[in-house]
Amino acid sequence: MYLTPRFYLVLIAVAAVMAAGYAWAPLLTVGQALLCLLVLAVVAETAALYGWRAISAMRTCPERLSNGDDNEIDIRVESTYPFGTRLTIIDELPFVFQRRDVAFALHLGARSGATVTYSLRPVQRGVYGFGHIRVFATTAISLVQRRYTCGAPQDARVYPAYQQLRHYELLAISNRLQDMGIKRIRRAGNNTEFEQIKEYVQGDEFRTINWKASARRHQLMVNVYQAERSQQVFCVIDKGRVMQRAFAGMTLLDYAVNASLVLSYVAIHKADQAGLITFNERMDTLLMPSRRPAQMERIMESLYAVRTDFGETDYSALVAGVEQRVSKRSLLILFTNFTDGQSLDRQLPYLCQVARRHRLLVVYFENSALHDYLGTRPHSTEDYYTHVVAQQMERSQQLIVSRLAQRGILSLRTTPDRLSVDVINKYLEIKQNEW
């Protein structure tokens, strides 16, 4: 049994009335009567709450949570009390969130139930353990609370952002991919073949209108084309310490993992074969490309297990592994991070070696904090000096694009929050050309 704050407030008021009775005697009698009523109310409410076990609660949590996305958790509460109750519901969240103040107030009528929904946004992959559900019940009097311990502890595994796959699929069905920034790429005429005829939607090429089919259907119809060849696409993830910089609570490694999952999904639906490579001191993951239905599940499980030991990346291990295991010319999309030209110079010979046999796209991250700082106005001598240094760092990052292009290596510089969209656009652009 728990006494509520209202009980103590009433008790203080009764004590004040009784204390005033020393100055005016009738108040002492009033105070004693109020004290008796308070005791009777506590006894009556305790008997009503503890007469039987009448509260049950159950948590509905998906077995897989999506990293970096809002995941909905439902708590269903049922009451068999013959009177209305006021409830305070506390769900024991995984300790990684460091939150113990999440409480939900709920009012239930007699013999009724309700569902409480809240969302969690994990920023790390792994196993998250939920505890019990604590429910504190009281009546309209609200002097006493009874605590119920409901639900069983359960674990949920946080996977790469698979919710984005559903989001992109729904946008594709409704032809709203442009809302996400996915560009329509003009098709080249020498590397596509006819696939199907569909209704015209905004953004389709006018040159693909099928006038005979449009006349028969009395609405515009267009020809849909697809690439003639199925290519191999590898997402290559650098797991070294350079990918541990945080942005909005998530590391660059997790952003690369999420983007790799989405890109693999898009590649398979574009009739390409998707594969995965991860490396740091050695190449420890090599998932050969495929477009079979089970490939996405294998990619997701492999990405779920991606971890780092914060070591220095060895690009020679990547070169050796690719030369030994990947014989067919493929598109390799490398997720890494170069802070300046010097960090690129150390790895450039290895990148050139990979680019001799494969089409290589290097994806690295823009320092958004540096960019935001350059947008401010300096006010002191020290600020001017800092701005000059920041401009030099920014210029050094911009030069990485041209230095890679001189050696026939494609590059993409983007921010973590734009990574998935920008990589998909770059992939669609590359797909229109010969690899």
Image: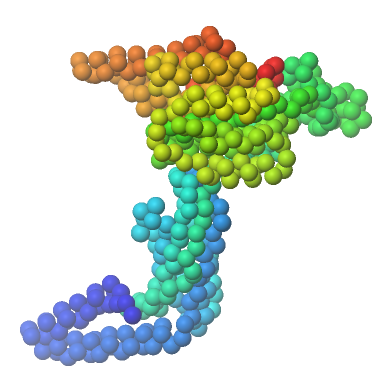
| Nearest the eye: 28 or 11 | 11
- The residue at 67%/22% (across/down) is 329
Figure check: 244 above or below 191: below
| Nearest the eye: 35 or 191 | 191
- The residue at 55%/17% (across/down) is 353
**Where is residue 38 shown, x and y percent of the image?**
27, 85
- The residue at 54%/15% (across/down) is 352
The residue at the far left in this view is 23
Q: Would you identify the image quadrant in which residue 28 lies?
A: bottom left
Q: Would you identify the image quadrant in which residue 390 lies?
A: top left
Query: How has the structure been colored for display?
Result: rainbow
Quadrant position of the N terminus in the picture: bottom left
Q: Would you identify the image quadrant in which residue 99 lies?
A: bottom left
Figure check: 8 above or below 210: below
**Where is residue 297 shown, x and y percent of the image?**
64, 45
The reply, left or right, for residue 413 in relation to residue 2 is right
**Where is residue 197 shown, x and y percent of the image?**
84, 30
| Nearest the eye: 378 or 250 | 250
The reply, left or right, for residue 148 in relation to residue 17 is right
